Amino acid sequence: MLTVGETGSTNADLLALASEGEPEGTWLRAEKQTAGRGRQGRAWSSPAGNLFASTLVRARPGDPSPASLALVCAVALAETIATLGCPAVTIKWPNDLLLDGAKLSGILLERQGDAIVAGFGVNLASHPSIEGRRTASLAGRLWIHSAEELYQHLTTAFARWLHRWRTEGLAPVVAQWEAHAHPPGTPLNANLADGRTITGAYDGLAPDGALRLRLADGRVHVIHAGDVFLV
């Protein structure tokens, strides 16, 4: 596990190391990022005191779908935070963690050949102000007080869930994801990849980890890609 004082992006750094043959299981944490990023190219505020860390997974024949690693990441982080004293955290599909309905963390997966880098950004000491979005931090909510301590617990939980994903398949990951999710029936808006926006009620996950959204007419729409927001 590597730690640096400051870098542009732990994901970018680890992708570069992956291209040089870095093995699976490598972690990189930065005290501060200057070019942190989230999904769809969004900037990720990265001040000192919060957690910014990435890990490298090498895709293997026989693994579940690499896209389902997003669920593994969410489950590992939610379990870590709950174990450390904040069980109120919920997961919003596919891998955002919410606290009292406000965004607490972001997880970004990027792939390069067989290398998949999963980056975690967690608002531990502070949270940014983002127009149109509520945000939250874990300040005062956990038994631990530093990003380093949170990092150590997360690496252990992620290794355990990655092993289960590989050896038991996606079913236990989906079950644990659903246990940490908002209640069935929660109203959601989904901005789909084709530009449409649909509204429905959360109806659990499909066996492959896709989101099930029950529409007003009773039909279930299965979503494999898109941005989801609580209504």
Image (tube, helix red, strand yellow):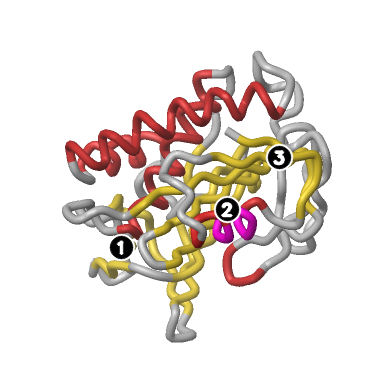
Q: Which residues are magenta?
A: 11-16
In percent of width and height, residue 223 lies at 34, 68
Horizontal side of 137 relative to 221 (left or right) equals right
Quarter of the picture holding the N terminus = top right
Find out whether residue 12 is within the magenta segment: yes
| Badge 1 density bin: few <14, some 14–19, many ≥20, Cα 10 Å | many
In percent of width and height, residue 164 lies at 26, 34
Q: Which mark is residue 226?
A: none
In percent of width and height, residue 112 lies at 45, 66
Question: Mark 2 or mark 1, which is nearer to you?
Answer: 2
Residue tagged 2: 14
Residue tagged 1: 214
Residue 135 visible in rendering: yes
The residue type indicated by label 2 comes to Leu
In percent of width and height, residue 191 lies at 49, 74
Residue tagged 3: 123
Horizontal side of 65 relative to 80 (left or right) equals left
